[in-house]
Image: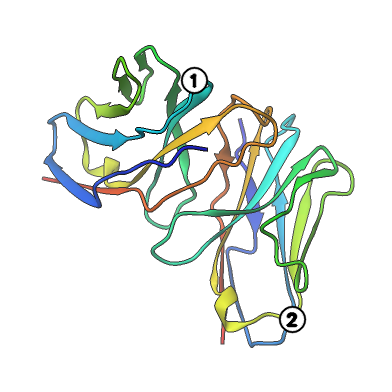
Amino acid sequence: DAKTTQPPSMDCAEGRAANLPCNHSTISGNEYVYWYRQIHSQGPQYIIHGLKNNETNEMASLIITEDRKSSTLILPHATLRDTAVYYCIVHHTGANSKLTFGKGITLSVRP
Amino acid sequence: EAGVAQSPRYKIIEKRQSVAFWCNPISGHATLYWYQQILGQGPKLLIQFQNNGVVDDSQLPKDRFSAERLKGVDSTLKIQPAKLEDSAVYLCASSLDPGLAGRYFGPGTRLLVL
């Protein structure tokens, strides 16, 4: 699976949009971009995934650039409960594919 | 829908002792994973089951770690004997299929080896 690069941390104000960047310049055609988050003392939580089109669900939006070398996870109205480590993972969908977690980006939402 | 259940939530043992963790995945999920998460790092896959068969155990330290999923539902992960560096959170996850579907994680078991 391709490697991803995320800044170590960022913060945003409560109620504002949080835009979390991820670079995956070596992504190949059959690899999806997945986002998970891990709130302190909990297991990781699946957020969203996409291939090339932008995706939106009740938790977040995923914007993937046209060349697929980077993506942005958008939390439209961040709350204090969104403070967590966010992992961007590139993953092909074969049965033997490993979902490899990096260190992620720590998002701190301030009041 | 009930989530992935794990027990115990916390365990403290001395080095060279044995320990076992239990996981009950989401009903109907054929794929089950065990991950190890050391403090400050992302989770690392130890073993993946598809029903009761092992798909990938390449990162499982087989000299001391073992896992089974006898009836294709619940799973246990055992460490025997434990070392100090095994101190970590052990996460169980399940998914409907190993490919596209998202993985659903349990709360984890926090192990401290003294």
**Residue A98 sits above or below residue A66 on the image:** below
Task: Residue under label 1, please give it.
Answer: A29
**Residue B39 sits above or below residue B48 on the image:** below
- Specify whether B101 is left or right of A54: right
Circle 1 residues within 10 Å: few <14, some 14–19, many ≥20: few
**Residue B3 sits above or below residue B16 on the image:** above
- Specify whether B96 is left or right of A92: right
- Among the 4 quarters of the image, the one containing residue A48: top left
Q: Find numbered disc 1 in the image and state the secondary structure of the residue it sits on.
A: loop
Q: Nearer the viewer, residue A49 or B23?
A: A49
- Residue B78 visible: yes
Please tell me which residue is depicted at 19% across the width and 33% down the height of the picture: A18
Q: Nearer the viewer, residue A45 or A50?
A: A50
Please tell me which residue is depicted at 45% across the width and 18% down the height of the picture: A51
- Specify whether B26 is left or right of A61: right
Q: Quadrant of the C terminus of chain B?
A: bottom right
Measured in 3D between alpha carbons, the distance from the residue under mark 1 to the one under mark 2, in whole angstroms, is 43 Å
Circle 2 residues within 10 Å: few <14, some 14–19, many ≥20: some
Task: Residue under label 2, please give it.
Answer: B81
Please tell me which residue is depicted at 43% across the width and 58% down the height of the picture: A41
Please tell me which residue is depicted at 35% across the width and 16% down the height of the picture: A56
Identity of the residue furthest to the right in this view: B71
**For discs 1 and 2, the disc positioned in front in the rendered view:** 1
